[in-house]
């Protein structure tokens, strides 16, 4: 589905995209903005990339701002939502995209490594949702979209912390979908496969053909292809879709 086919959003809708400065997150910000949504581009350390994303949106006539927050800090998450609300308006669309993946054998994985992965990949999504839900309930409309991973379903050697957190994110998605079902808020997840981002490029070095052979479509995905699915889930056209996990993997995982 191309952006030209997407319905234009209500002008006052505001989206908060965590990890929105690069890769999939940046593509999501651009796709939402192209549909008339004001976007808060969250970043932690990538200030330059966040500013470039905001500038690109503004040059196209959209509304956007960059907001810094360390998602490990609960107070920073609350302030992230407050700043977004003050400058753009109440958050109607939350995209929990921020994530961190490190390569560690389970026997070398310290408690600190495990806990940081859960804090960034799972707990931050819970805290962001908790902070944004009241405004969504007040307006009787909201979209929460959690970016999980194929690893949540298949597991991943040397990434037990990451796969566990992303599986937990699916549990959070399903639970919130049931709890918020009568309030006009939908909660869904997407699970990207091998998308051409910096992380995937580093991981597949020297294994490109092997990875291509494992993907039925025979190619890697683009961040924009994931972003199109998020933009669809953020629209009014998905008012009867909640508690879903959409695989965006080129057939790497089916079912």
Image (cartoon, grey):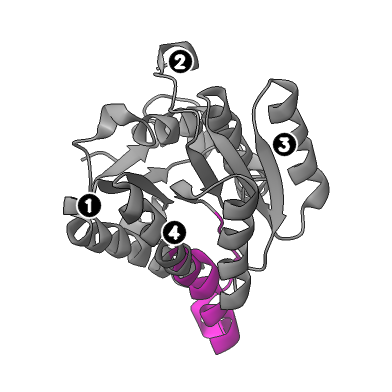
The first of marks 3 and 1 along the sequence is: 3
Q: Which residue is mark 3?
A: 53
Q: Residues within 10 Å of mark 2 (few under 14, many from 20)?
A: few
Give the residue displayed 74% in from the left and 45% down from the top. 50
Quadrant in the rendering for residue 105:
bottom right
Residue 2 marker: 2
Q: Are marks 4 and 2 in contact (CB under 8 Å)?
A: no
Query: Gap between marks 1 and 2, in whole Å?
Result: 29 Å
Give the residue displayed 39% in from the left and 69% down from the top. 164
The first of marks 3 and 4 along the sequence is: 3
Q: Residues within 10 Å of mark 3 (few under 14, many from 20)?
A: many
Q: Which residue is mark 1?
A: 183
Q: Position of residue 146 (x, y in %)?
A: 41, 52
Query: Gap between marks 3 and 1, in whole Å?
Result: 32 Å
Query: Gap between marks 1 and 4, in whole Å?
Result: 13 Å
Mark 1 element type: helix
């Amino acid at each position: 589905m191309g952006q030209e086919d997407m319905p234009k959003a209500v002008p006052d809708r505001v989206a908060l995209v965590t990890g929105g400065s690069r890769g999939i997150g940046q593509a999501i910000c651009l796709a939402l903005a192209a549909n008339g949504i004001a976007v808060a581009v969250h970043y932690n350390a990538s200030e330059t990339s966040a500013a470039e994303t905001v500038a690109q949106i503004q040059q196209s006539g959209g509304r956007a701002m960059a907001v810094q927050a360390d998602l490990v800090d609960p107070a920073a998450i609350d302030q992230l939502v407050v700043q977004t609300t003050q400058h753009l308006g109440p958050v109607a669309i939350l995209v929990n995209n921020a994530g961190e993946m490190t390569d560690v054998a389970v026997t070398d994985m310290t408690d600190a490594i495990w806990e940081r992965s859960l804090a960034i990949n799972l707990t931050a999504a819970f805290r962001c949702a908790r902070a944004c839900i009241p405004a969504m309930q007040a307006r009787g409309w909201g979209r929460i979209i959690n970016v999980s991973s194929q690893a949540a379903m298949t597991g991943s050697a040397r990434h037990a912390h990451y796969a566990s957190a992303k599986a937990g994110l699916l549990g959070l998605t399903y639970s919130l979908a049931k709890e918020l079902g009568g309030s006009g808020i939908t909660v869904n997840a997407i699970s990207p496969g091998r998308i051409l981002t910096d992380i995937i490029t580093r991981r597949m070095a020297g294994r490109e053909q092997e990875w291509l052979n494992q993907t039925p479509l025979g190619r890697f995905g683009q961040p924009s292809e994931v972003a199109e699915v998020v933009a669809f889930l953020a629209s009014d056209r998905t008012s009867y879709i909640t508690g879903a996990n959409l695989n965006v993997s080129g057939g790497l995982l089916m079912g």
